[in-house]
Image (tube, rainbow, N blue to C red):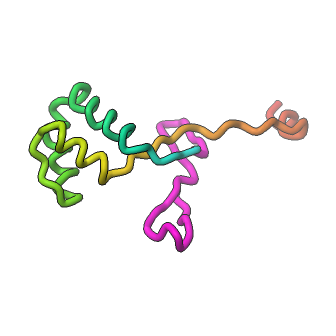
Amino acid sequence: MYRHGGLGSAGVQSAVLVQVGRLRYRPQQRLLSSEETLAILQEYPRCHPFRARFLLPLLMSLVGVAYDGTPEGLCALSQILRGVAWRPQEQEEESPRDAKSRR
């Protein structure tokens, strides 16, 4: 589920709910720096070599950058694409009424 961020961020949406299997949570999210995005792009081929051979060139073509497989190509991609980190929001303290309803 997504919520529009307003006029200042036209086309940018933030997640309202994330669901992975049976796990559902309201996410806290932040944009990654280009350095953090580069670290992820550098690690991805080591963890997923087959996918990376096809996925990275596809991503580069979608943003209009020719991918040559070099570290410089990954650096260019990290400057253009923004990574997003999601994690569950910190839980607020439970009210006594909420605790009773769970019993």
**Residue range (magenta):** 1-27
Residue positioned most to the top: 46
Location of residue 70 (image quadrant): top left
Q: Note whether 81 is above or below 24 in the view shown.
A: below
- The residue positioned 17% from the left and 50% from the top of the image is 58
- The residue positioned 17% from the left and 55% from the top of the image is 65
- The residue positioned 30% from the left and 46% from the top of the image is 78
Q: Note whether 83 is above or below 93 in the view shown.
A: below
Q: Quadrant of the C terminus?
A: top right
- Front-lying residue, 74 or 46: 74
Q: Is residue 99 left or right of residue 63?
A: right
The mark total stands at: 0
Q: Is residue 95 left or right of residue 56?
A: right
Q: Note whether 81 is above or below 90 in the view shown.
A: below
Q: For residue 13: magenta?
A: yes
Find residue 92 and report its horizontal and vertical position in percent: 76, 39
Find residue 81 and report its horizontal and vertical position in percent: 32, 51
- The residue positioned 26% from the left and 26% from the top of the image is 47
Location of residue 23 (image quadrant): top right
Residue positioned most to the bottom: 7
Residue positioned most to the left: 68
Q: For residue 28: magenta?
A: no
Q: Is residue 51 left or right of residue 97?
A: left
Q: Note whether 60 is above or below 50 in the view shown.
A: below
- Front-lying residue, 51 or 39: 39
Find residue 96 and report its horizontal and vertical position in percent: 90, 36
